[in-house]
Image (cartoon, helix red, strand yellow):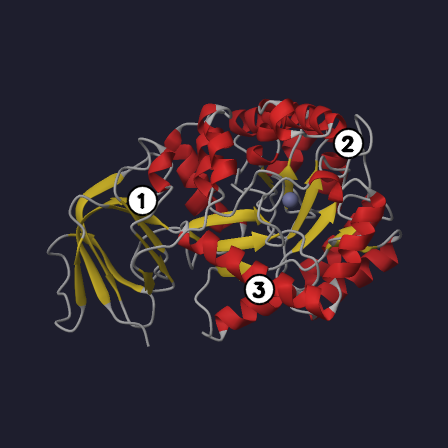
Amino acid sequence: MRTPFALTGISVVTGDALGTIHQDWTITVEDTGTIGYAGPAGGADLPTTALRIDGRGLFALPGLINAHAHLFADGTPLGSAATNPRLAKYATWLMRTPLGRRILFRRTRDHAAIQLHSGVTTLRTVGDVAYEVVAIREEIERGETVGPRILPSGPLMAITGGHGAPQIALIGDDPLTARANARQNIRRGAKAIKISATGGVSDAIEIGYAGRPEMPEDSMRAVCEEAHEAGVLVAAHAQSSEGTIAALRAGVDTIEHGSSMSAEIIELFLDNPASLRGFSALIPTLQACLPLVSLDPSVTGVDPVVRANAELVLEEMLAGVRAALENGITLGVGTDSSVSYVTHSNYWRELDLLQHVGGMEPAAVLHAATQGNAKILGLDTVTGSIAAGKVADLVVVDADPLESFRNLAAPRMVVARGERIVRPQITRIDEIDRLLDTL
Ligand SMILES: [Zn+2]
């Protein structure tokens, strides 16, 4: 059983689109892990048994949600492991040996813990090696490990030679096989489905490869139908407007990374009859491209083809963000953790980039990261805001995150489903952080 507690005198950053902050609030958390009261001081009788935590001078915000994560790697540049077919084959074989699986499981669990200690109380994976994240989710749900709430995808859905294949993908070249793959993932415990609708940056073999359409629309439609029947949302990696439109027509619920938008694309985002809930959302992941483009290639040693693709994709992605903002398209936040230069401790950097490169207002960014993501993932009755009856997912920091998202880099406390992590321990990769600080 969790210890009930009360945070008193705290400033509450609500995560609404206006950037509302309430001063001198009290938040009580019950032993069930839910919020009993969140409001002005004096509005609730604190149970005498509850632990009182003095929150004066501190800021509480809703637990952060990472709608696009991978947990298999730590953000160290992937290098040729993704593009060299022999190395890729070796890595794939290694991950499937008993020893490889044990190592992968332990690393994955560590990465989930880093995300949590960095303030991410909910995450969705969108491409796992196998079902290792499903197993970790089950461990967390059984209460054996403290971790974030996880919606695991299992391996993603790709075509032969497609993005993510074969390392983190099940291959399906026709609608029947694609549907069977989706069914298998759901049977094995996946709570999210991911499709590669186009080629990607990390495994591009020539310039212009990244946005090339991959899974055909009829196969994507079969995957969406299968997932939606189970109430599971479908994400599609799409880095060109051709890929985006096919994915949206097929009924995909979230477009990952994104592209420039035609009138038809905008209309389909806002009103998508084939999606699970009538609309689709955009999850840009600026961190996945910006370091590859902006860091000095003589320092990073990034492959020139990968860099050129990242440049094209970044341009498309930023055009997508602009179109989403102009047209009221629901926008979420994901980091693409595990890919080159995206560590598990750097969720705050995505927010920083959305503000300074994406041109979003800080309040809109934090809203997307909390209430917005909760709505996109269908979790808005559970998490994403601080209110009585919601699950207690909170981040407590020393300074106002809306002043600078860097204030989220080292939380004072994280609360996940009512469980307090008092002094979060974050394993960072200093070399990567030093490079990213120069951007
Ligand atoms: Zn990804």
Q: Nearer the viewer, mark 3 or mark 1?
A: 3
Q: Nearer the viewer, residue 128 or 93?
A: 93
Question: Which x, y percent locates residue 419?
Answer: 34, 65
| Residue 216 can be seen, yes or no | no
Residue 253 relative to residue 376: left or right? right
Residue 204 relative to residue 288: left or right? right
Q: Nearer the viewer, residue 394 or 371?
A: 394
Quarter location, residue 227: bottom right
Which mark is drawn over residue 242? 2
**Quick one: label 3 or label 1, which is nearer the N terminus?**
1
Q: Give the structural element (helix, strand or loop) at label 3.
A: helix
Which quarter of the rendered picture does the N terminus lie within? bottom left
Q: Which residue in the protein does label 3 denote?
A: 106
Question: Which x, y percent locates residue 425?
Answer: 38, 54
User: Which residue is drawn at the image coordinates 51% and 41% (left, top)?
Assistant: 333
**Quick one: label 2 or label 1, which is nearer the N terminus?**
1
Q: Give the structural element (helix, strand or loop) at label 1.
A: loop
Q: CA distance from mark 2 to mark 1?
A: 37 Å
| Residue 105 can be seen, yes or no | yes
Q: Give the structural element (helix, strand or loop) at label 2.
A: helix
For the residue carrying disc 1, how many other residues have a C-alpha within 10 Å: few (<14), some (14-19), or many (20+)?
A: many
Q: Which residue in the protein does label 1 denote?
A: 14
Ligand 1: image quarter: top right
